[in-house]
Image (cartoon, helix red, strand yellow):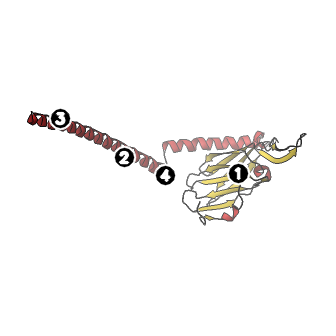
Amino acid sequence: MKEGSISGERLWTRERDAHASAIINGDSTSPALVVIGGRNNDQLMNECLLFDNITTGQFSCKKIPLPQSVTGRYRHSVTAVSMSPHCVWLAIVGGYERLEYIRDDGGMIKPRVTFVTQSDRIMIIIELVYTEAGEWIVLSVLDGNDLTCKKYQEKYSSYSKTRTWWMDQLIEYPTEKEMKLQRYIQSLHQELQVAHQNKVSLQEALTEANKQGTCLQCLTYNIHFTLKY
């Protein structure tokens, strides 16, 4: 990332590691990168950042408000699942919630981590939707307890039907972006075939030239031998 290329880059003010990230993409939106949690040394980074327009070279960054029960973790996993052209579910699983140093019986200081084990935190789903205003917002946060309730089952069933129809449409009726990509891939294959044919032709020409050169050397040697004797 070039300096000054990110609007809102003041949000990324501290180094971090052990965070989790995922790419989200709608039907008509530029891919965006979501970064959740992580740590800076021993301090948790309780935030969720969204980098938009990551394919344009001009990034924009903003914070997505989420409860600490979601962001207060590190070494966790995040998976993005497209449920509809304008809805993405982020599934967040596991991780550590605390790192501390303790002194053992021998006087040695050792790190001790605390896993995220609470039933309502071990798996969380974030429902993101892309609005008409052109931005991703959080529609709902479903914790581990919500995933077993009837409301979640009904919502998932509804999205599942929509997603099945949507995926079928993508297969039967590809978008203009997908058709352009397919044409580009086909052109690359054609260029590769031409390059391979040219390489084979060049190799054959070099082989033939080497043969001609060998014959010429033999003929020259015979002439010199005949003239000499």
Residue 141, position as x, y percentages in the image: 75, 50
Residue underneath mark 3: 218
Mark closer to the chain start, 4 or 2: 4
Residue underneath mark 4: 177
Residue 47, position as x, y percentages in the image: 74, 56
Residue occupying image coordinates x 37% and y 46%: 191
Amino acid type at image mark 2: Glu
Mark closer to the chain start, 2 or 1: 1
Disc 4 vs disc 2: which is toward the camera?
Answer: 2
Residue underneath mark 1: 17
The residues tagged by marks 2 and 1 sit, at their Cα atoms, a distance apart of 42 Å
Q: Residues within 10 Å of mark 1 (few under 14, many from 20)?
A: some
Amino acid type at image mark 1: Asp
Residue underneath mark 2: 191
The residues tagged by marks 1 and 3 sit, at their Cα atoms, a distance apart of 70 Å
Q: Quadrant of residue 138?
A: bottom right
Q: Are the residues tagged 4 and 2 within 8 Å (C-beta)?
A: no
Disc 3 vs disc 4: which is toward the camera?
Answer: 3
Q: Quadrant of the C terminus?
A: top left
Amino acid type at image mark 3: Cys
Residue occupying image coordinates x 56% and y 51%: 27
Disc 1 vs disc 3: which is toward the camera?
Answer: 3
Q: Residues within 10 Å of mark 4 (few under 14, many from 20)?
A: few
Mark closer to the chain start, 2 or 3: 2
Residue occupying image coordinates x 65% and y 61%: 61
Mark closer to the chain start, 3 or 4: 4
The residues tagged by marks 3 and 4 sit, at their Cα atoms, a distance apart of 62 Å
